[in-house]
Amino acid sequence: MNGVASIKETLGLARQYLEAAVQETDAATLSRRLPGATIGPIGEIYGHTIGNEDWAFNQLIQGKDLLLKSGGWAARLGLDAESTEHDWNAVAQNHLGALQEYGKAVFAATDAFLAGISDADLDRPIDFFGRKETMGWVIADTVLVHVAFHSGEIASLKGVMGLKGLPW
């Protein structure tokens, strides 16, 4: 398996865990803040995770506008397209279906990008907060690991709420 194929497979699995973790999660569960916790609610984590993939692949790697802005998703989600700060918790509570559709659009755009690159492209340098990192490193750090970690957070939060974190 080559590098791009490995990224595609890993990202597919990470997204599967993310979507499984938010299954059967109502608005109250999405917005619940646990007493004494230093972690945000599930809705905030879920929206942030999707928005991060949009940022990483579209803006950081490709230098394009976020789908949130260019695809009209900000308006559908009740967000300001020009802002960089979003209340993902409120979005998840009030527009979960639209947020999941935004996620599908982000995932499709990412998949289309990955379909058009080669392993050699993974070595392309990306300016990452003032330092140069390879595209492969940026994808691994800002998307693959990010999605997997947040999926685990969501499943864990559901578990401490007495709910089933993942459906299997």
Image (tube, grey):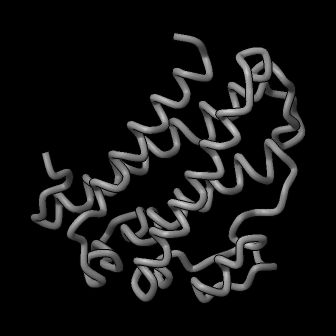
Image position of 93 with respect to 5: above or below? below
**Left or right, 138 with reference to 30:** right
As drawn, 129 above or below 87: above
Q: Position of residue 165 (x, y in %)?
A: 19, 55
Q: Quadrant of the C terminus?
A: top left
Q: Nearer the viewer, residue 1 or 124?
A: 1
Residue 12 picture location, percent across and down: 44, 38
Question: Is 44 displayed left or right of 128 in the figure?
Answer: left
Find residue 31 and report its image quarter.
bottom left
Question: Residue at image x 41%, y 78%?
Answer: 96
Quarter of the rendering containing residue 124: top right
Q: State the image quarter where residue 94 is shown.
A: bottom left
Judging depth in this view, the residue of 68 and 113 nearest the camera is 113
Measured from the top left, where is residue 46 in percent x and y? 44, 63
Vertical relation: 53 (above or below) 96: above
Q: Residue at x 69, y 70 (%)?
A: 68
Name the foreground residue: 121 vs 136.
121
Q: Is residue 88 above or below residue 166?
A: below
Say whether residue 166 is left or right of residue 132: left
Percent from the top left, x then y, of residue 76? 60, 85
User: Relative to 143, is 62 on the left or the right?
Assistant: right
